[in-house]
């Protein structure tokens, strides 16, 4: 068994020992809200937003972008599970600012091995065969972090399956301080009809 796999399973058996009354948790999130955020390993939404098991939905992808699949999850979150407030939370120093779809497509076309980055940009360290399929994907990268939060909130707000009464708040998590900084233009775009 790999080292990581045995570590994860050991941690899980410890966790399960004190599982207690979490077995009684209901399926719908008790606090009625959802967070869309980045998969970045430095972000722990349970900690930065004060969540316990059962509290809220957390939808994560690269960048915390409002992809079709993120919107699918948000619509389920409200329509079937009753959430009524949503947060879009990107963060400083996001990897999605460090490449674009053309770069990703070119890297993948040449090799599937993990690439490296330096002052000259991204490059493959091995060329063991790649895939052209990356050329057909919009990798949803961005250059302007605050603008990307606004765009994502606007995209969710504009979706016909998203009720107008759900406020959508836009934030950037600061990886240097752990603080959430509001993107006012995003929250304005995500405000509710009065
Ligand atoms: Zn990120």
Image (tube, rainbow, N blue to C red):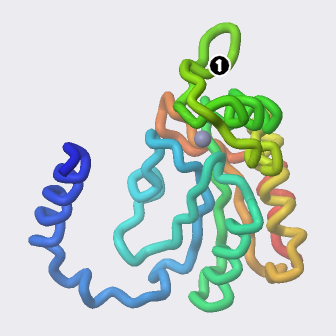
At 45% from the left and 82% from the top, the residue drawn is: 30
Label 1 CB-ligand 1 distance < 8 A: no
Q: Residue 109, how many percent across, how many down?
A: 72, 35
Foreground pick, 73 / 149: 73
**How far across and how far down the image is residue 32, in percent?**
55, 80
Question: Which image quadrant is residue 71 in?
Answer: bottom right
Q: Residue at x 80, y 49 (%)?
A: 138
- Residue 27 position, x and y percent, is 44, 88
Q: Is residue 144 visible?
A: no
Q: Secondary structure at mark 1?
A: strand
The quarter of the displayed image where residue 19 is located = bottom left
Q: Taking the image as drawn, is residue 98 in sight?
A: yes
- Does 111 sit above or below residue 189? above
Q: Quadrant of the C terminus?
A: bottom right
Residue behind mark 1: 123
Q: Is residue 169 left or right of residue 91?
A: right
Give the vertical position of 123 relative to 166 (above or below): above
Res 110 → quadrant: top right
């Amino acid at each position: 068994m790999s080292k990581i796999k045995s570590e994860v399973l050991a941690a899980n058996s410890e966790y399960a020992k004190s599982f207690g009354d979490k077995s009684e948790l209901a399926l719908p999130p008790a606090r009625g809200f959802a967070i869309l955020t980045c998969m970045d390993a430095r972000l722990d939404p349970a900690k930065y937003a004060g969540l316990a098991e059962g509290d809220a939905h957390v939808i994560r992808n690269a960048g915390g972008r409002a992809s079709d699949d993120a919107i699918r999850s948000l619509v389920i979150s409200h329509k079937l599970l009753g959430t009524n407030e949503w947060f879009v939370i990107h963060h400083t120093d996001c990897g999605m600012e460090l490449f674009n779809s053309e770069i990703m497509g070119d890297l993948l076309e040449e090799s599937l091995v993990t690439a490296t980055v330096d002052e000259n940009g991204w490059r493959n360290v091995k060329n063991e065969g790649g895939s052209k399929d990356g050329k057909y994907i919009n990798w949803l990268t961005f250059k302007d972090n605050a603008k990307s939060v606004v765009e994502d909130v606007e995209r969710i707000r504009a979706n016909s399956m998203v009720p107008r009464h759900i406020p959508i708040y836009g934030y950037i998590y600061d990886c240097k301080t752990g603080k959430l900084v509001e993107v006012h233009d995003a929250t304005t775009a995500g405000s509710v009809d009065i």
